[in-house]
Every structure is written in structure tokens, then in C-alpha cells.
Image: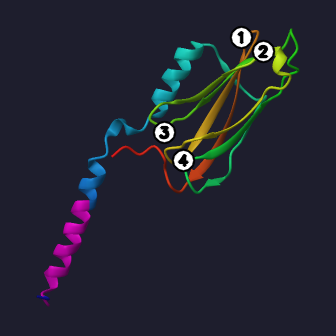
Amino acid sequence: MPSDLPHSHGRRQFLKLGSSGLAVALIPVSAFAETDDMLAAQAELFGDRPVQTGRVSVDLPPIAENGFSVPINIQVDSPMTEDDYVSQIVILSPRNPLPVLAQYHLTPRNGLAAVSARIRLGGTQSIRVIAEMNDGTLWSGEKETLVTLAACVVL
């Protein structure tokens, strides 16, 4: 039964907005890691050692239509000799439920400090990659990608 009252349209809008707000409120706050969680994971892995920017090249698509499978290519500038090599590469996320997405251990026998993979992303974010060298120094690179359909949503 349609109503021509001016407030009936406002009431419908109010109910729609209220239902939408309730649905958003029901998403657990812990569904996404925060930057603090990512920094805590970084500290757990590497302690308080300084992280320098550079030597790590991160390639992500500028727009990922689907966060369930986003290609990432990482390359670290290193000769990969017995005296100078990358011992590990860690991929960190500020918005996924778990901040450590992947951890790769390398030796000079790898020959090239490069990794190609597919990762799940819980929304638009800037991915940080940290490379630990055999002498203990840490190098990083970051790349942002816009995710149109997030993968790590917990309802």
C-alpha cells in the first residue's frame, strides 16, 4: 500500500542505512591486521635492526580486480655469492588477517634473489618486502595496489 506521506520515503532510507550500518558493525574488528600488527611482526622477525630503503624491487599490478590471487614479483639487487647474498625475503601486509604473507629462505646456490608468487590481499594496501642479507642488514621495498574485490573478509 503506497504512501504519499513525505516522511515515508525518509523512513525507508533510514531503515536501509541502519541495516547497512549493522552489517558493517558485525564484521569483526580483528578481521584485518593493522599497521601496528605488521610492525610487531617485523620486530618479531628482525628485532630492532634498522631497515634501509632500496635494493628490493616489488612489482604488483596497480589495480587488482580480485584480491584472491594477486601476482607479485620481487627482485633483490645482490650478487648471490658466498660473501654477499640474500638469506631471506619476507612479504608483509598491513591489512590481511595475518601480517606475514610469505617468507622465503635463500642461499648463494639460488643464483638469483628473485621470487614470483600469487598472494591474497584483504583490500587496497601497500605491500612491504624486507630482504635480510647474510651480514644481517635489512633492505626494503614497497608497492601499493588497489584491490576492487577483497579476499580476506571474515563475516
Label 4 sits on residue? 68
Mark whose residue sits in front, 4 or 3: 4
- Residue at point 60% right, 28% down? 102
* Left or right position of 15 against 108: left
Mark sitting on residue 136? 1
Q: Is mark 2 on a helix, strand or loop?
A: loop
Question: Which quadrant of the figure has residue 109?
Answer: top right
* Kind of residue sitting beneath label 4: Phe
Disc 4 and disc 3: Cα gap in Å?
14 Å
For the stretch drawn in magenta, the main secondary structure is: helix
Disc 4 and disc 2: Cα gap in Å?
30 Å
Mark sitting on residue 107? 2
Mark sitting on residue 95? 3
- Compared to residue 131, the image places residue 145 above or below, namely below
* Kind of residue sitting beneath label 3: Arg
Disc 2 and disc 3: Cα gap in Å?
30 Å
Q: How many marks?
A: 4
* Kind of residue sitting beneath label 2: Thr
Residue 1 falls inside the magenta stretch:
no
* Left or right position of 10 against 129: left
- Disc nearer the start of the sequence (2/3): 3
Disc 1 and disc 3: Cα gap in Å?
27 Å
- Disc nearer the start of the sequence (1/3): 3
Magenta highlight range: 3-19
